[in-house]
């Protein structure tokens, strides 16, 4: 708190007010004190009033007519002078605690003395003063407009429930005293009734021996002829000292105040219930999120525990097939997300790479793998283009529009070697363009998302290279790499009505500059991409446009992944990833060729 706030409270002589209407010895005491509000606003000056055994505070002296912002009944209040701060006093009633500061120690002591005087000499301490201290007005004022306004203001601020409970304590004390007073009155009335009955009984028995009763009392003649009173005038034993009508009115006002306060408390509690229900719902939602985060963290911890060699791919792995697949699928999902985020950046990169002449692709060139390349090309042309219809060994596993993916299950020594074959039709591109983007390593990173790094180990000819390629690891599977020869060929059609065929074949080879390492499992591949371009005649004299082009694609993959990955996982991953790869690649080619000259 700032110094000016700390010492701005005052209970100065000019601020103190005396209420001449109060009984002698009980003085209304009011003035400015600093009240601690909260950690944001700290100490704030407030107008504090001590009256009728109640301490109330207002925002300022000018705003007293709008009602108090809070009040405390001092009947059960605990007042403590601060041990170290000589200007501070703390007042508490149950859970309500006020921190107040005076201008100086002298004014603090005046406030403490005034509070103690009110506690000791308050009119609430005796029955005869119930009307004198104005309880009638204070009780009925609960229904007045000012009280309603102040209560509504307090209600809106959310502090009124505590104040109303404090008022209930005050009402309870008043009511208990009034009940005692009325009980004594009724007891007195009962005693008088018993005396009257006893007198009447005696008079009935001896009425012949007694003269007629007189107004001044009952007279009797003794033996000496003198007169004396047989019965003294009946007195209600102190009942005459109590104004029964006034007590009844005050009692009625007290009960009305209690009912009004109870009604207000019920409204407050209903509103508080709604507020607490909303807070409960928020806490439940927070709990749900925390539990979800806990489970996720627990799974991550389990995975981190699995990072040990016993929980990774291997002949004696302790991780089961379901956990293995879940982990692989989660890693692939993360890779897809990263690819989507980087896709926009990749599409902004435009490279203009010259396309070699078609004559370069009419043969494999002269190199040590020429015969092997020719053999692979002929195998693909012979077997890869065969129709799968009628072959029960091929199973259709995916069908999405023009794309169909077939699989034939083959295992060797427990290793999955399932051949995959996919057919697809892509509009607006040629077979030459598709094969060029598939073969040319300059575009590889634009569409291939599973590669960690690659390099051309050796260039055999203009259309044949040897490539080393390391794939991203998908935990808990081991990381894999592949060394393969990639060749691109054009196969002219034997019939002028048939389209030319463009083909890229990738098959594993060995090379002294790329030996297998213990870091990765070396996979073996035999992949063929075969494309044919179908051209529909344009209308009239129009030139051929990309709207007239359709590329029929056949993709064949024979992969030996090596290692010890579960067969069910390998098949599930292949079924998931191959269609995604083919759609991603063909979409990339369409984007790259849009608006460019056609390359037949």
Image (tube, grey):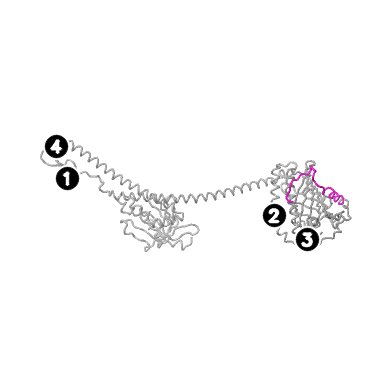
Question: Could you say where residue 314 lies in the image, as x and y percent from the top left?
Answer: 75, 43
Name the residue nearer the viewer: 156 or 303: 156
Residue, disc 1: 215
Q: Earlier in the sequence, mark 2 or mark 4?
A: 4
Give the alpha-carbon distance from disc 2 to disc 4, as whole Å: 124 Å
Left or right: 529 in relation to 141 = right
- Residue 209 circle label: 4
Real-space Cα separation, disc 1 to disc 2, in angstroms: 114 Å
Q: Earlier in the sequence, mark 1 or mark 3?
A: 1
- Which mark is in front, 2 or 3? 3
Circle 2 — which element?
helix
State yes or no: discs 1 and 3 in contact (Cβ < 8 Å). no
Say the numbered circle drawn on residue 338. 2
**What is the total number of numbered labels drawn onto the structure image?**
4
Distance Cα–Cα, label 2 vs label 3:
44 Å
Between discs 1 and 4, the one toward the N terminus: 4
Q: Is residue 588 visible?
A: yes
The reply, left or right, for residue 108 in relation to residue 209 is right
Local secondary structure at mark 3 = loop
| Other residues around mark 2 within 10 Å, as few (<14) / some (14–19) / many (≥20) | few
Q: Nearer the viewer, mark 3 or mark 4?
A: 3
**What crowding class fits label 1: few (fewer than 14 Cα within 10 Å), some (14-19), or many (20 or more)?**
few
Q: Which residues are magenta?
A: 373-401
Q: What secondary structure is marked by label 4?
A: loop
Q: Are marks 1 and 4 in contact (CB under 8 Å)?
A: no
Residue reaching furthest front?
540
Image-based side of 490 in relation to 446, left or right: right
Mark 2 vs mark 3: which is more N-terminal? Answer: 2
Q: CA distance from mark 1 to mark 4?
A: 18 Å
Is 217 drawn above or below residue 5 in the view shown? Answer: above
Q: Look at the numbered discs 2 and 3 and tell me whether their residues touch, using CB distance below 8 Å.
A: no
Q: Which residue is mark 3?
A: 539
């Amino acid at each position: 708190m700032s110094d000016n706030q700390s010492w701005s409270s005052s209970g100065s002589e000019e601020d103190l007010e005396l209420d001449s209407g109060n009984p002698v010895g009980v003085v209304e005491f009011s003035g400015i004190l600093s009240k601690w509000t909260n950690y944001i606003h700290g100490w704030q000056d407030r107008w504090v009033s001590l009256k009728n055994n109640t301490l109330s505070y207002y925002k300022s002296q000018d705003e007293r007519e709008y009602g108090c912002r809070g009040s405390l009944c001092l009947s059960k209040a605990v007042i403590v002078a601060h041990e170290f701060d000589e200007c501070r006093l703390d007042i508490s009633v149950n859970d309500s605690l006020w921190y107040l500061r005076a201008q100086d120690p002298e004014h603090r002591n005046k406030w403490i003395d005034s509070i103690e005087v009110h506690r000791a000499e308050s009119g609430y301490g005796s029955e005869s003063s119930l009307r004198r201290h104005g309880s009638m007005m204070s009780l009925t004022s609960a229904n007045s407009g000012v009280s309603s306004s102040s209560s509504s203001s307090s209600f809106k601020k959310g502090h009124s429930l505590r104040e109303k409970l404090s008022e209930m304590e005050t009402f309870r004390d008043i009511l208990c005293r009034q009940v005692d007073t009325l009980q004594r009155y009724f007891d007195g009335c009962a005693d008088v009734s018993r005396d009257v009955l006893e007198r009447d009984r005696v008079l009935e028995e001896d009425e012949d021996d007694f003269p007629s009763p007189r107004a001044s009392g009952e007279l009797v003649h003794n033996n000496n002829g003198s007169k004396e009173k047989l019965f003294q005038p009946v007195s209600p034993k102190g009942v005459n000292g109590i104004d029964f009508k006034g007590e009844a009115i005050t009692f009625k006002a007290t009960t009305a105040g209690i009912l009004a306060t109870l009604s207000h408390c019920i409204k407050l509690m209903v509103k508080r219930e709604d507020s607490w229900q909303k807070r409960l719902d928020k806490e439940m939602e927070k709990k749900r999120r925390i539990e979800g985060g806990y489970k996720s963290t627990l799974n991550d911890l389990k995975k981190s525990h699995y990072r040990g060699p016993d929980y990774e791919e291997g002949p004696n792995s302790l991780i089961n097939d379901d956990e293995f697949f879940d982990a692989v699928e989660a890693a692939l999902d993360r890779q897809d997300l990263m690819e989507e985020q980087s896709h926009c950046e990749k599409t902004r990169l435009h490279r203009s790479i010259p396309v070699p002449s078609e004559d370069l692709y009419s043969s494999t060139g002269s190199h040590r793998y020429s015969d092997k390349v020719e053999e692979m090309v002929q195998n693909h042309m012979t077997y890869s283009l065969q129709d799968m219809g009628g072959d029960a060994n091929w199973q259709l596993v995916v069908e999405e529009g023009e794309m169909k993916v077939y699989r034939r299950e083959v295992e060797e020594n427990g290793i999955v070697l399932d051949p995959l074959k996919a057919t697809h039709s892509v509009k607006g591109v040629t077979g030459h363009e598709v094969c060029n983007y598939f073969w040319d390593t300059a575009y590889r990173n634009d569409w291939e998302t599973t590669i960690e790094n690659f390099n051309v180990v050796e260039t055999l000819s203009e259309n044949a290279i040897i490539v080393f390629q390391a794939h991203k690891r998908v935990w808990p599977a081991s990381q894999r790499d592949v060394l393969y020869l990639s060749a691109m060929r054009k196969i002219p059609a034997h019939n002028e009505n048939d389209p030319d065929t463009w083909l890229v074949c990738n098959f594993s080879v060995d090379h002294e500059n790329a030996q297998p390492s213990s870091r990765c499992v070396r996979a073996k591949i035999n992949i063929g991409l075969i494309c044919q371009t179908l051209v529909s005649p344009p209308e009239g004299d129009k030139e051929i446009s990309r709207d007239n082009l359709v590329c029929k694609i056949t993709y064949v993959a024979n992969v030996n992944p090596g290692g010890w990955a579960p067969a069910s996982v390998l098949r599930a991953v292949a079924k998931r990833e191959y269609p995604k790869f083919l759609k991603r690649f063909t979409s990339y080619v369409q984007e790259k060729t849009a608006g460019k000259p056609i390359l037949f």
